Amino acid sequence: MISIDETYLSTWLMSNYIGQCAQLCTFYILQLSDDVGTTINFQKVLSEIVRWRLNTSLYDMWSAVGFADFQIPAVMSWRSLTAHSCVYWMNELTKIDERLSAYFSAVALLHVGHKISRNCFNSELMDILSTVLGYNFNQCCSILSQCKTELNTSELVELLQKSAVEHITTYRQLMASEFGCVATIVTTDYEALYAYKRGDYQQCLQLSTQNVHTLMSCAVYRPIEVPTLPEFIQLMDDDIVSLTALTLIVNPESRDKRDDCFISQVTLSLYLMTQCQLKLRHSVTSLAKTFDYIKVAQRGIPRWRTLEQLTLKLTERKVHRISSSQFDCRRS
């Protein structure tokens, strides 16, 4: 070991690691690595690799977060939850990124709500809630105390849905602050969805319209997605539920594919925007502007994203049908 000096160690690192790193970089850095004959050139290659890595690390983390957004609800739907698995999930996700625990908590609350609506509230589900909400003591006491009262099933499910939306909104806000420079993220998509579900169409329209304008005016569009898995479908209206069911009837394996069980924020926002305009009896002029947004969105969605294309087509037909009927009434 005494014979190993800085020159030897630098040469060894260059031969075994730096060259491999350069293979992952741009062609410019790769060319530099082929001509490392002096200390100055060596330092330049290292500096360029470090600069490249700093510039790309945020994109890599963004990809990892996107993967987690899909895997968390997907695995939960396939394998269900227990109090023990909740502890494992929370611990492992915190190691990756503490912010993911907020998303996991939201999905877990929706998972319990989905279970309650299909069966009944039992000690196993109570243990899951205690485990998930134990990370937030005040909220845990509030929800669990209400669970032990005489709330009926629908009231309890609504309570869990409301709490889940709050968790997801917090998660969206954390993601927007971290990744706002690599993706356009609106943070109120679930708030709008929940407002629509409880019949507050004016609030839903306001939030959805803002989201559409933000998403469709961004310079670089990297879509954030909303699952239509069982845990999330309870927040959506009958038309989306029926559309999802039809895709499963045609292809039962579609739920296993991300492109077939997720829709983007812009598609969801356009759907909610349209539905609220129809509920509030907006003018043909207002609907015509929405129709234009829908046509633009359709051109930006790949054809293989079947559920998303169908959702936009359904939204388009709703606008077209109402606009045509209003036009016919005015002409007559």
Image (tube, rainbow, N blue to C red):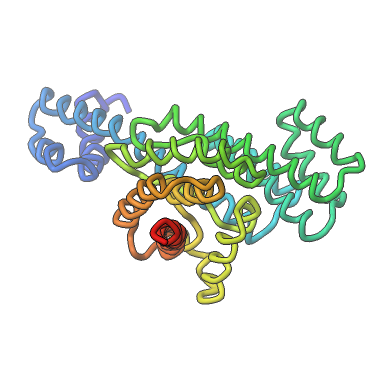
Where is residue 144 shown, x and y percent of the image?
83, 37
Residue closer to the observer: 13 or 194:
194
Q: Is residue 141 above or below residue 79?
A: above
> What residue is at 71 percent from the left and 31 percent from the top?
135
> What residue is at 24 percent from the left and 44 percent from the top?
24
Where is residue 192 shown, x and y percent of the image?
55, 40
> What residue is at 19 percent from the left and 26 percent from the top?
7
Query: Relative to residue 262, is residue 198 drawn left or right?
Result: right
Residue 5 figure quarter:
top left
Query: Relative to residue 288, is residue 104 drawn left or right?
Result: right
* Quadrant location, the N terminus: top left
Residue closer to the observer: 165 or 287:
287
Where is residue 316 shown, x and y percent of the image?
41, 59
Q: How many marks?
A: 0
Where is residue 61 shown, x and y percent of the image?
41, 38
* Quadrant location, the C terminus: bottom left
Instruction: Report whether residue 47 is seen.
Output: yes
Residue 33 figure quarter:
top left
> What residue is at 55 percent from the left and 34 percent from the top?
171
Instruction: Report whether residue 68 is seen.
Output: no
